[in-house]
Image: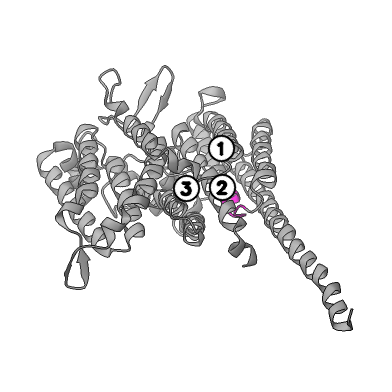
Amino acid sequence: MTSSAATTARTRPTTETASIRIRLRAPSRLRNMELVLLLFACGINAVTIILVQLGAMGSVDWSLATLGFGLSILVFAMHIALRIVATNADPFILPIATVLNGLGIAMIYRLDLGDGLEGWNSAGIRQIAWTAIAITLAIVVIAVLRNHRVLQKYRFTAMFIGAALLVLPALPFFRPVNGAHIWIQLGPLSFQPAEVGKIALAVFFAGYLVTARDSLSMVGRRFLWMTFPRARDLGPILVVFFAAMVVLVWQRDLGTSLLYFGLFLVMLYVATGRASWIVLGVGLFVSGALIASQLLGYVGRRFDTWLDAFNQENYEASGGSYQLIQGMFGLANGGLIGTGLGQGRPGIVPLAESDYIIASLGEELGLIGLFAILSLYLLLVSRGFRIGFAGQDDFGRLLAVGLSFVIGLQVFIVIGGVTRVIPLTGLTTPFLAAGGSSLVANWIIVALLLRLSDTVRSEPRAVIE
């Protein structure tokens, strides 16, 4: 053997060993980063609860620490599950969800202190219990779903499940809540099926658009700078549009109809790359909403309270702008740095723990605190988009973008309504607002994004990068 050949023989194993080390170190580095961020997130949540108690009561009640410690154990259990079955999962998603969920629990608990509620009668304790259930279900999803591509086989099953969950509250034996058919009341518990339904429909939309995108993107007529689809290709968007209008008319729920239609529209745009779909979709929905505001009294009242909130007649009317104005005054009272946790008066706003929790947080954390919360949402959505754009299979890309966008759109709809950017709707703020169905749905979305990110990073190209 020549010296050059011997040198090659000696260096080849070294190179292969180095390659193996890179593959082993990368997952460990990601999980270690996640561990550090989780410790920081749990520390923020603990300090937030302590500040709430000091501000509202002047002392610290350590009995709540037991429940908070239990939630931290569950979060770290999910971290351990990721180390075992999803070693390459994104390290930022879980800590962000933990902080947002913790801030929501702290504010709901603070509102309970203002109302004098304790024990299981308090919304804060119920929120902690629902958080435990939601995180447990997320761990189950991570452990059971080892490959997201399995979901593509069940796209039509997901369609039927999503449609059934959407229309379920409108059945005759379920009574409307605040005039809207969006809740199911089962004894002392209430559940909002549309929250889970959005996940099922995202799976269906992703599976459908993978097979239909060629006919929706390659043929059409060019007008100005865009290529518009043929009339016979408008079927899918018209079906979803009329379904959204049925939700608006039948269930009296503007927020859910906008959420579902917006989800399909964005996934359609990502699948085809045609901006004309956005133009057509926005035009359809705005036209439908304007027609509904003229024909349906409750939609018209929403527009009236939005456009003329300070009108005395709208302010004093049942279901008028009283809640909106109180929330705006609360935000104004918070100013730049807020009144301090436990120091404001967020309880005077109706539904401060659910629909208006952003106004409650804005009053006590100020504009700076709200910007920090919005930055967390922005980072969460951007990580989801990054997972989608880095994926190599079309179904996974569409699903990641759809699940991320639905969180971002829901945040925009809620905060836009509270700040009078758009008409107020009845959606919940992801992870923050009180409600078990919202927590369960959004933690499942977190689990799915983590599974998708693990698949993307496990691919050879992602490992090299």
**Among numbered discs 1 and 2, the one appearing first in the sequence:** 1
Residue 414's x, y, as percent? 36, 47
Instruction: Compare residues 130 and 166 and report the one nearer the observer.
Output: 166
Q: Quadrant of the C terminus?
A: bottom right
Q: Residue at x 57, y 43 (%)?
A: 102
Total numbered labels: 3
**Mark drawn on residue 141:** 1
Answer yes or no: is residue 454 visible. yes
Discs 1, 2 touching: Cβ within 8 Å? yes
Instruction: Compare residues 276 and 313 and report the one nearer the observer.
Output: 276
Relative placement, left or right, of 404 versus 221 is right
Residue 265's x, y, as percent? 30, 53
User: In the displayed structure, would residue 375 be above or below residue 183?
Assistant: below
Q: Which residues are magenta?
A: 89-95
Q: Quadrant of the N terminus?
A: bottom right
Please identify the quarter of the rendering in which residue 447 is found.
top right
Relative placement, left or right, of 327 versus 24 is left
- What coloring was used for the rendering? one colour
Q: Nearer the viewer, mark 1 or mark 3?
A: 1
The outermost residue toward the front is 1
The type of residue carrying mark 3 is Leu
Please identify the quarter of the rendering in which residue 37 is found.
bottom right
Relative placement, left or right, of 411 versus 260 is right
Answer yes or no: is residue 310 visible. no
Residue 163's x, y, as percent? 31, 34
Which residue is under mark 3? 361
The type of residue carrying mark 2 is Arg
The type of residue carrying mark 1 is Val
Discs 3, 2 touching: Cβ within 8 Å? no
Q: Is residue 278 magenta?
A: no
